[in-house]
Each structure stands twice: as structure tokens, then as C-alpha cells.
Image (cartoon, rainbow, N blue to C red):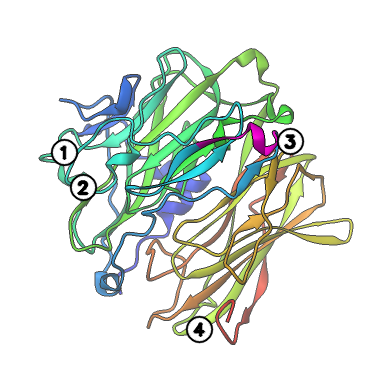
Amino acid sequence: MHKFAALSIVCALAACGGDTPSDSAAGTGTVGTTNTPGARPASGAAGSAAEVPSAMVNPSRMGSRSTPAGTTPATPVNTPAMQPPAAMAPVTTPQAPGTPAAMPVPAGGKMLAMDECGLKTQYPGDEYCINAPAPDKGFQFHVGPSNYENPESKYVLLAGEENVINMSGVSGNDKDIQYYYRQYRMRPGSHHVILTAGGQRIGGTQNLARDNPQYGIIPPENEGIGLPLSARVTINANMHFYNFTDKPMIRELWVNYWYKDPATVKETAKGVFSMTGVSAAVAHSHVVVGASCPVTGTGRVLSFSGHRHLNNVRFSIWHKTGGQRDLVFEDYDSEHPGIVEFNSLTTNTAPNPMTKTMGGMSGILNVKQGDMFDFECEIINDTNTNFVGQNEAADDEMCILTGDTVGAQVTAGCTAITARKVTSPAGE
């Protein structure tokens, strides 16, 4: 079976310079930035565009899935406990296209913006389009076709098609800025987007709809956190899309970056990217792989998540400090991977392996030099091929710890944990 080159996602997440396409390669479509509502396709591009396609996947197993992975926005399990229930106002947050469900949003929070552009195309995911910030508040980075009636071929995914490409455009800020709050929206079929600029990762998600931080609420201990972005810098989007349906889909991304007053920034957030091999997951096996990663410096973890593919049935993270080992995050849904935030305003639900409900530790997750984080992936390989860690969502696997810290750093230099076999699927 044809395998993708593993370099694409590894370099994008780790901000490898060699994976960024040339800025001079112009393209059609809308790849760039805007401060106009909706980032609707216009007559031309809003910046330079380039792409580096990876090989197509053999779609032999894709016919078994009737819907694209990720058609449902991840349902946040973090329930900020900043106000009693009486102060919570019900709002509507789409859980699936056309199927809204009421979710409480704390006072002072922003509901998950959806369906702001009034798009009516023939492709799934119109409701993920959101408006750009006002020009003095931020900018939107957009990747997508210039014409939905006749989209450029690089934005179209045919039935059974899967690829990983890089597209770049120029940021919309005309001076150096600081940011923290981001909004991510992608059409169905997306497995991930990883954004880099100037050799540094500036965000990314595996969710079709995600705000970071959730609800736009910044707890008091994080008010001094910011992330720098140079004026008019080239942003690269590493995008993995796949189409498990029998109809064409399109690749499209909207990301809003909201400016932060530089005078308030005292600390810079750092990304977490720690991976382990999956070679123990040979054909027709059920195994657990993982790694143990040291902490350098003193600080706290802002968020954790697990990057993996569709054969993962459990992703777990433990914090080891002072001879104690505590479970801080566990997730069972690789199709809609969860993210857990650790702060003074958030109460996370406890993970439940019986109901396959993700969850994590509540409160601030302080760390210090010498602490460790263990993470592991439970993988069921029911294919005829051995997994090696390539970019095939259904026919290979990855096991990567991702997140953000401040002050401290979870290093990428992790020690693999001896893989072990599992005799029955998780929860059975």
C-alpha cells in the first residue's frame, strides 16, 4: 500500500524550515489574509500561495466509512467554573452540520462562532465559515477556492482521495504584534492543520471548530501570556485532508488571530511536540506504545492533546512528580480528538473508559525541572500492513503529545516505553 512521506507532518509540527514552500510560487484561489467579513472567495488571491502535494493514498479501505472523519466539531469537556449555573446563558453550538445543541457559555465568554458568512455551496461545511476580526482587532488567514462553482483543482478532494499539502500566504498585520486568542474553522474531511511562520509554530488543530482558549476566556494567571508575530510574515499551513465519501469535497480553512496589547505581555507560550514510534503495531495487532518526556524549567502546562489517526482507541497522559504519577488527560475518540485546558477557571470532567468520555485534571497544572510526562496510545491495527508512522489516516498511525506550556518546556527528547500487547479491545 502506498505510504506518505512522514516528513510532512513531523516537520510542520516541529517547524522544520525545509518543509515550508517557496514564497515566490504564486497560485490561484484564496490563500492569504483578510479583515473583511467571512473571507468569502473573491476574484483573486489575498497573498502568495504555494503547495507541496504528498502522494495520494490507496483508497482500498475508505469505502467502509460513510462520512468524513471530523464532521462533528469536538464537544468541549472543559466547563469553566467561574460562575454559578444561574449566571450561565444558554447558546447554540453546532454539534453536527444542521444539528445545533444548546451549550452553556460562561458570562464574559464568546460562543463558538459558526455560519457567519451565509455560504450556500454544493459542498459540506458551509457553516464553518466565520467573519474576520475588525482590522484594528486582528486578521484572518484563509485557504480556499476563489470560486465555489468552479474551484481550483488543488482545493478539490475527489472520492477516496487523501493528501497532505502546504499552502502559504502573507499575514494581515502591518506591524509586529502579539496575539493569544485564536479561532480555527475547517471544512469536513480535515485531519489537521499546522501553522508556522518564521520557523516557529503559530497554532494548529485537529478539530473542525476550535477556539483557543476555549470561549475566549483568559484566566488571571494567563493574562500576561502572548505570542509574537512579525509584520507581513509568510504563514505556512500544513493541511491533511481526506475524503471517505462518494462525492467531491473541498479543502478550506479559516483562522482568526486576535491582537493582544503588547504592554500586557510578560510571558511567551511554548508549543509541545513529543512523539514516539508505532512500529509495534504490526498487521492484525492490538498494542500500547508510548514515551516518557522530561520537563525543563519551572512553569505550567496550558493545554494538552494527542495527535493520532483513526486506529487509536485511547490516548493517555500522566504527570510524574515527587514519586507520584497522576493521570491528567485521557481521550478515546481519534475522529474528534479532544483538548484539555488547565487553569484556575476550568473544571474538567473525569475521563470515563466505559462510556468513552474524555476528561482530565482540573485546575492549574504546575510543573518543575525534573518532572516527567508519560503518554501512551492504544492502537488496533486490523489492516494487512504494519504501521510505521506515516500520514495515512486510516491505514497508518502516529502517537504524538501536543499542547502548550509557559515557563517550563516538555522536551521532544523522550524515552520510548516498552510496547505491550493487549488481549481485547479497550472497554470490552
Give the residue drawn at x 48%, y 51%. Answer: 74
Marks 3/2: CA distance?
43 Å
Q: Of circles 1 and 4, which is in front?
A: 1
Nearest to N terminus: mark 1 or mark 2: 2
Q: Can residue 202 be seen here? A: no
The Cα atoms of the two marked residues, 3 and 4, are separated by 40 Å
Q: How many marks?
A: 4
Label 2 environment density (alpha carbons within 10 Å; few <14, some 14–19, many ≥20): some
67 is higher (above) or lower (below) than 191: below
Q: Amino acid at mark 4?
A: Ser
Q: CA distance from mark 1 to mark 2?
A: 9 Å
Name the residue beneath numbered marker 2: 123
Neighbour tally class for label 3: few under 14, some 14-19, many 20 plus, Cα within 10 Å: some
The kind of residue tagged 2 is Tyr
Q: Is residue 159 above or below residue 230?
A: below
The residue to which callout 4 is attached is 285
Sequence order check, earlier mark of 3 and 1: 1
Placement of the N terminus among the 4 image quadrants: bottom left
N-terminal of the two: label 1 or label 4? 1
Q: Residue at x 47, y 31 (%)?
A: 198
Q: Tell me if label 1 and label 2 are in contact, CB under 8 Å.
A: yes
Lower sequence index among marks 3 and 2: 2
Element type at mark 3: loop
Mark before the other along the chain sequence, 3 or 4: 4
**Mark 1, residues whose alpha carbon is within 10 Å: few (<14), some, or many (≥20)?**
some
Q: Earlier in the sequence, mark 4 or mark 2?
A: 2
Residue 113 in picture, x, y percent from top left: 42, 34
Magenta span: 83-90
Q: Which residue is mark 1?
A: 148
Residue at the spot 52% in from the left edge and 18% down from the top edge:
177
* Label 3 sits on residue: 407
